[in-house]
Image (spheres, rainbow, N blue to C red):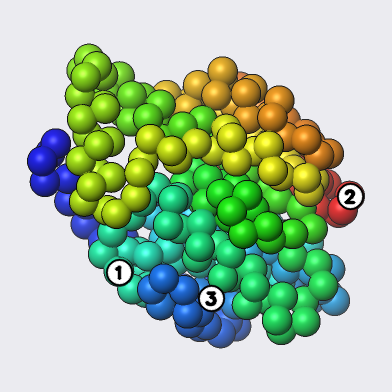
C-alpha cells in the first residue's frame, strides 16, 4: 500500500434523482458531471452546490439535496474526479478537487445565479475551503461538515482506526501519495485555508467522529474570521448526521441558509 497507493473501486451512481433533472458537464481539470435539479413547488431562493466525501459520489447526496429542494433551493450535485460520471481515476482528498469546486461555482455564476451556497462533507468540505482560499470565490454562505485539520492528521487518524502506529508510516504514505498524485500533501492544510473564509459559515461535527478530532474542528472554527456557527451532534460519527439526526440536521441547515 505504501509504494503502490490505495486502489478503491470507482464509486458508481446507483440512484437517480426523484425529480426532473438535467445532466451538466463542466470543464475543469477533468470533465465533471453534475445533476441540476430545480426547487420543488416554489420560487427559487438560490442554488446550493453539493460536494461529496471520499469514495462517494453525487447519488449519495440526494437525501441531503431533498432537504434543500423542499425548502426552495435549486441544487447542483457534483461528482468529483474519479467518481461517478466524472473523468479521471484519482482522488487527492480535496487538493485538486478545489479547482473543480471553483469551476462549478463559476459555472453557476456565469448563468446569472445571484445567491450561490456551497455544501460539502468531509473531502467536499475541504475542497470548498481550499477553493475559497486559493481562488477567492465568494459564495453567499457555506456549510462544511467534518473537515480535517491537515492531510497528515487525517492519515494519522486512519492508522489509529487500524490500531497501527502512525509514526513513521503516515509520513511515508503521505510522501508517496504526493509523488504519485502530483501535489505536496504536507501543505494540504484546511485549518489554514479557514483563515481566508470571510463568508458566513456553518461548521458541523459529530462528537463520535473517529477520523476528525474535536481539536481539529475547534481550530478550524477559531480560524474562521467571518460570521460563523458551530453545531455538534452528540450521537453522530463521521459524515452520518442526516442518517442519525435528520430532523435536527434539516432544521439547522435550512435555518442557516434562510438567515443569509
| Picture coordinates of residue 106, whole percent (x, y) | 64, 73
| Picture coordinates of residue 62, whole percent (x, y) | 54, 62
| 145 vs 18: above or below | above
- The residue labelled by disc 3 is 35
- Camera-nearest residue between 223 and 247: 223
- Camera-nearest residue between 104 and 37: 104
Q: Is residue 138 visible?
A: yes
User: Which element is circle 3 on?
Assistant: strand
Q: Are marks 2 and 1 in contact (CB under 8 Å)?
A: no
User: Which element is circle 2 on?
Assistant: helix
- The residue labelled by disc 1 is 88
Residue 59 lies left or right of residue 143; in this view the side is left
Residue at 28% over, 59% down: 90
Q: Earlier in the sequence, mark 1 or mark 3?
A: 3
Mark 2 or mark 1, whichever is nearer to me: 1
Residue at 51% over, 30% down: 149
Q: CA distance from mark 2 to mark 1?
A: 37 Å
Residue 253 lies left or right of residue 85; in this view the side is right
User: Which element is circle 1 on?
Assistant: loop
Residue at 45% over, 50% down: 94
Q: Are marks 2 and 3 in contact (CB under 8 Å)?
A: no
Q: Is residue 235 visible?
A: no
| Picture coordinates of residue 169, whole percent (x, y) | 20, 24
Q: Are marks 1 and 3 in contact (CB under 8 Å)?
A: no
Within-10-Å neighbours for mark 2: few <14, some 14–19, many 20+:
few
- The residue labelled by disc 2 is 259
- Camera-nearest residue between 61 and 95: 95
Q: CA distance from mark 1 to mark 3?
A: 18 Å
Q: Earlier in the sequence, mark 2 or mark 3?
A: 3
Residue at 68% over, 37% down: 195
Q: Quadrant of residue 175?
A: top left
Amino acid at each position: 500500500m505504501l509504494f503502490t497507493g490505495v486502489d478503491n473501486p470507482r464509486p458508481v451512481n446507483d440512484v437517480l434523482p426523484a425529480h426532473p433533472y438535467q445532466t451538466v458537464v463542466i470543464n475543469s481539470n477533468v470533465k465533471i458531471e453534475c445533476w441540476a435539479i430545480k426547487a420543488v413547488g416554489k420560487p427559487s431562493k438560490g442554488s446550493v452546490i453539493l460536494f461529496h466525501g471520499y469514495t462517494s459520489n453525487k447519488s449519495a447526496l440526494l437525501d441531503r439535496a431533498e432537504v434543500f429542494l423542499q425548502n426552495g433551493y435549486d441544487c447542483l450535485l457534483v461528482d468529483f474526479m474519479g467518481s461517478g460520471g466524472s473523468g479521471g481515476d484519482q482522488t487527492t482528498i480535496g487538493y485538486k478537487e478545489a479547482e473543480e469546486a471553483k469551476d462549478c461555482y463559476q459555472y453557476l455564476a456565469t448563468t446569472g445565479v445571484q445567491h450561490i451556497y456551497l455544501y460539502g462533507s468531509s473531502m467536499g468540505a475541504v475542497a470548498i475551503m481550499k477553493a475559497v482560499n486559493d481562488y477567492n470565490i465568494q459564495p453567499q454562505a457555506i456549510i462544511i461538515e467534518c473537515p480535517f485539520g491537515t492531510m497528515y492528521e487525517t492519515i494519522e487518524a486512519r492508522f489509529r482506526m487500524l490500531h497501527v502506529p502512525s509514526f513513521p508510516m503516515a509520513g511515508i504514505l503521505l510522501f508517496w501519495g504526493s509523488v504519485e498524485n502530483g501535489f505536496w500533501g504536507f501543505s494540504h492544510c484546511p485549518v489554514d485555508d479557514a483563515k481566508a473564509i470571510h463568508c458566513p459559515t456553518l461548521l458541523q461535527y459529530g462528537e463520535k467522529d473517529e477520523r476528525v478530532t474535536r481539536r481539529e474542528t475547534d481550530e478550524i472554527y477559531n480560524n474562521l474570521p467571518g460570521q460563523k456557527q458551530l453545531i455538534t451532534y452528540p450521537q453522530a460519527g463521521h459524515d452520518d448526521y442526516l442518517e442519525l439526526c435528520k430532523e435536527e440536521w434539516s432544521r439547522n441547515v435550512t435555518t442557516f441558509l434562510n438567515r443569509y
